[in-house]
Image: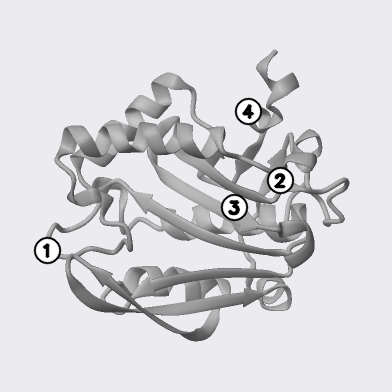
Amino acid sequence: MPTDHWPLLGLRLRTPRLELRLPADGELAALATLAAEGVHDPDRMPFIVPWTDLPPTERARSVVQHHWLRLGTWSPRDWALNLAVFESGRVVGLQTLTARDFAVLRQVSTGSWLGARHQRQGIGTEMRAAVLHLAFAGLDAQWARSGAFEDNPSSYAVSRKHGYEPDGTDRHVVRGHAVTERRLRLTRKRWEEHRKLPVTVDGLAPCLPLFGLTDGGGEGRTGPA
């Protein structure tokens, strides 16, 4: 079985409405098609790398290539878990959890996107809850980082619900213009105070070496929050 050699294929995160996991080939194609249909208003750019400025066909191809790239370059010291998000069996977006030197730093970062027609339905909050549970309860993280440009209030709203606090600013050049990113940081204590949604994680134990861990040290990798 492929999971014998790549156990991440068996990792499952579940919330009341959603399932997050690595996509199969057909599901990856559906994710790429969703990106091609649109992720945000074209008048604004919420990403540091403006991949959504690509024409629809190239945008879809970039989703597939990025998925393969992240899997192909995975190492326990530098990893990016790109999980397709499913609602009622259909792909609605992508939720990413990344880290470098996680075994030492115990810090993760998150990123995500949703297909335009699936936004403003609370899905973003729920999918973030899933990966935060994986990070803190499953992998024993101590900090989680996020950030968004000043004109992205929906991303800030999701972060505030989970207890993130301001962590300074960064400046970037996007589409040839200077933009300000407001950084956010979530401590383990703040996560514990703000978590509300039940989350279950299945198939984590055999994945731990891929995250740079010999054991998780978390509080319920296969049980509810």
Q: Which amino acid does label 3 sit on?
A: Ala
- Give the Cα separation between the discs numbered 4 and 2: 16 Å
Question: Is residue 6 in view?
Answer: yes
When asked about the image quadrant of residue 154, the answer is bottom left
Circle on res. 130: 3
Q: Position of residue 222 (x, y in %)?
A: 78, 43
Label 4: which residue? 9
Q: What residue type is labelled 1?
A: Asp
Q: Which quarter of the picture shows residue 60?
A: top left
Name the amino acid type tagged 2: Pro
3D distance between C-alphas at marks 3 and 1: 30 Å
* Horizontal relation, residue 23 to residue 33: left or right: right
Nearer-N-terminus badge (3/1): 1
Name the N-terminal-most of marks 2 and 3. 2
Within 10 angstroms of label 2, few (less than 14), some, or many (20 or more) residues?
some
The residue that mark 2 highlights is 76
- Residue 161 location in percent, x, y? 51, 73
Between residue 61 and residue 89, name the one nearer to us: 61
Q: Name the residue under label 1.
A: 43
In this view, the residue in front, 220 or 56, is 56
Describe residue 71's horizontal placement relative to residue 47 as left or right: right
Quadrant (top left/top right/bottom left/bottom right) for the C terminus? bottom right
